Amino acid sequence: MAALSDTITMAIDRARKAENGRHAELLVNDGPLRQTVIALRQGVRLAEHNSPPAASIQVIRGVVKVTGEEEAVLETGFIEALTHHRHAVEALDDSVFLLTTVTSVPGTESHGGHMSTTGELLPVREEEMTDSEQATAHAEMDHESGGGRSDS
């Protein structure tokens, strides 16, 4: 596995070059636990989406605004629990954050119902997924296929 600092640098470099201005790297995929580094170019917004049962956002570089039922501007070094309500994330500067999620809790659905009761992802057409869900799914696919990662 690459050092976190290398992953952060690579993620923001890829986001700056990407047509959509974002890049996601899945770091930890352990049962319902996911930790993903997400990089956004300044002005890029992840569309409003549902929160999983538990989530936090830690800004590693830059400044982001989280909007929804409550609004917060988070700068480098800030960590905050995400609300259990729909929210969006906008980069006010070129930004990188660590998104930590618990994707399933027995008896609840998360990520818009795209999880089975065993926590497995159900087949979903990509156009039905939010931008954030697509980024996370793409990161998970890259991780599983070895694409987009440099293991050391």
Image (cartoon, rainbow, N blue to C red):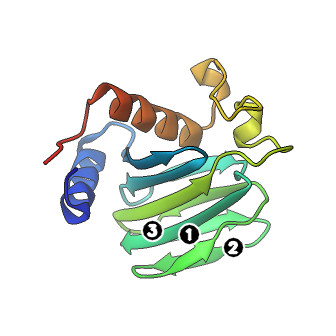
Do the CB atoms of the residues marked 2 and 1 lie less than 8 Å apart? yes
Do the CB atoms of the residues marked 3 and 1 lie less than 8 Å apart? yes
Q: Quadrant of residue 37?
A: bottom left
Label located before the other in sequence (3 or 1): 1
Q: Quadrant of residue 139?
A: top left
Disc 2/disc 1 C-alpha distance (Å): 7 Å
Residue at the spot 63% in from the left edge and 76% down from the top edge:
72
| Image spot of residue 152 (x, y percent) | 13, 48
Label located before the other in sequence (3 or 2): 2
Residue at the spot 55% in from the left edge and 39% down from the top edge:
131
Q: Which residue is mark 2?
A: 71
Disc 3/disc 1 C-alpha distance (Å): 7 Å
Residue at the spot 27% in from the left edge and 30% down from the top edge:
146
| Image spot of residue 41 (x, y percent) | 35, 55
Which amino acid type is marked by label 1?
Lys
Does 31 sit left or right of 37 as displayed? right
Q: Is residue 136 above or below residue 117?
A: below
Q: Is residue 15 above or below residue 129?
A: below
Q: Which residue is mark 3?
A: 92
